[in-house]
Amino acid sequence: MAFEMVGVVGLGTMGAGIAEVFARAGIQVAGVEADEQALARGRAHLERSTGRALDKGKLTPAEREEILARVTLTTSRADLRDADLVIEAIPERMDVKAELFAELDRLCKPSTILATNTSSLPVTALAAATGRPDRVVGMHFFNPAPVMGLVEVVGTVVTDPGVRAEVGDLAVRLGKTPVEVDDRAGFVVNRLLLPYLNHAVTLLDHGVAGRDDIDNAMKLGVGLPMGPFHLLDLIGLDTAYEIMNVLFDESRSDRHVPSPLLRSYVAAGLLGRKSGRGFYGDPGDGPQEKAPARTVHVVGSRELADRLEAAGFKDTEDADVVLQVGGSTPVSGRTVRVQLKGQVAELATSVLTEQEAVLGARDLLKIAGYTPVPCKDRAGLVVDALLYCHLNDAVRMYESGYASIEDIDAAMRLGCGYVEGPFELLESIGLAKVRDGLRDLHAEWRSPSSAPAPLLDKLVTAGLNRFPRP
Ligand code: 3HC
């Protein structure tokens, strides 16, 4: 199929981004919104995004004009009659989407492929609302659509394999990498990403660490492009909450219980960027208080001791603050357990730790060139608790036969900007280290989902540090 003209229904952040992606690939787009006001918002999205590219010198003024001219904005769905493909990106309500699909089925020519960008609803149910279920697919883009390189192509049991292939080829023409997935809650990316983000909210809710500290830990300690709270604000807290509900409804797993804190943000209308405020955007956001640097004693890291000595601190055993790198929970109030992860230093505080010691430790670690992450002394602290459970989910997904190792790695690299996919990360950290970390987490929290996936356990027992690939 030539795909000369496509329709996009719904021009919110995702819909407008998708329209831009098609127009950039030289395809005519009919962008449909419910009323003139919504249409104006869609136009503003398109102008802002292409304007940004213009400012950065990525587009010339003439190219920008050509892209914008390829998008016809309309409030009439009848304008979609001759589209080769129509993709919807309207709010995630099954009844409204099903009604739209039934209408598109009536309006569009018989060969039109009907696609949904849904992140959580079953594509099969939308296919069933039409008289052409074989020509209905999921075409799932990632936010920001013009930037992220992945499209999940979701086929159902009734999708014509030829249609799947054509949509995959179209994604390539758009400059994206398609990954074919089946119609299962969360597909690949959201099924792995959202439980990890939800877990971060749970740590915040339990007071294990603060918002900025958790974001710093995952961005700087793991190298992810954004911390979980920044990413939740980008995705939209209502969307995230909805996806967690859908995952839980399907799996009934403790891992998929939506965080009550997430629910209360949504109930308060704090939805992230789209509403102007989510986890960030609080007028009270400001710099943290500073503690004075003090005398220090370092245990367990020559490098940290040297860095502090170079900064002018004399190491004395009776210091105000003792930094104990590694080891078990200290039994002195002025001793802070430190876990170094690249440029991040997690500072684990127990019921005994004095607040002054924590503030002093934070200050000292900054001076030594680390980003301090104060947190409660719990198994896995912040980074390992979040990361190992996330990686374990990927192993379980592969074990269940849902997606290949290559597809899971590619999906997380291209859909979420990871430098390494989950399996690449597992192998670079070391399977035994992750398995043992998961055992510690399971021993502490007893949640069934934190038990190491059987395959991970078996590979470690067999002395291997590599997953089987064809
Ligand atoms: N629209 C268009 N372009 C944008 C953009 C936007 N909203 N935001 C950023 N960009 C472009 C910039 O112009 C820049 O392009 P350039 O390199 O060609 O100049 C590039 O993206 C990098 O932007 P910045 O330098 O401003 O910022 P960062 O380096 O911090 O990158 C990011 C921003 C690309 C968003 C990066 O942080 C990232 O990859 N984050 C992860 C995003 C992610 O995980 N998305 C998936 C969420 S899940 C989802 O969407 C599924 C849904 O169903 C929930």
Image (cartoon, rainbow, N blue to C red):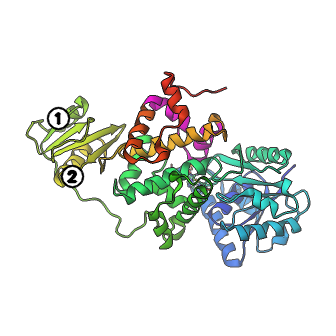
Residue 309 got which mark?
1
Q: Residues within 10 Å of mark 2 (few under 14, many from 20)?
A: some
- In the image, residue 191 sits, relative to residue 51, either above or below, namely above
Amino acid tagged 1: Glu
Residue shown at 65%/63% (left/top)?
Answer: 46
Image position, residue 182 (x, y; %): 72, 47
Q: Residue most toward the top?
A: 463
Q: Which mark is residue 369?
A: none
Q: Which residue is mark 2?
A: 359
For disc 2, does the CB lie below 8 Å from ligand 1?
no
CA distance separating discs 1 and 2: 19 Å
Q: Residue at x 65, y 57 (%)?
A: 119
- On the question of residue 420 being in view, the answer is no
Q: Residue 157 in the image: state x and y as whole percent.
A: 80, 49
In the picture, measured across the screen, residue 106 lies left or right of residue 460, that is right
Residue 415 painted magenta: yes
Kindly state the secondary structure of the residue where label 2 is placed.
helix
Among all residues in the image, which is located at the extreme bottom? 36
Considering only order in the chain, which callout, 2 or 1, is on the residue closer to the N terminus? Answer: 1
Mark 1 Cα-neighbour bin, 10 Å: few <14, some 14–19, many ≥20 = some
Quarter in which the C terminus is drawn? top right
* Observer able to see residue 295: yes
**Is 347 left, or right, of 205 in this rendering?**
left
SS type, badge 1: helix
Q: Which amino acid, by three-letter code, is at mark 2?
A: Leu
> Residue 131 in the image: x percent, y percent?
88, 62
Bounds of the magenta span?
A: 407-432
Q: Nearer the viewer, residue 100 or 130?
A: 130
The residue positioned 38% from the left and 39% from the top of the image is 440
Q: In this rendering, which labeled residue sits more in front, label 1 or label 2?
A: 2
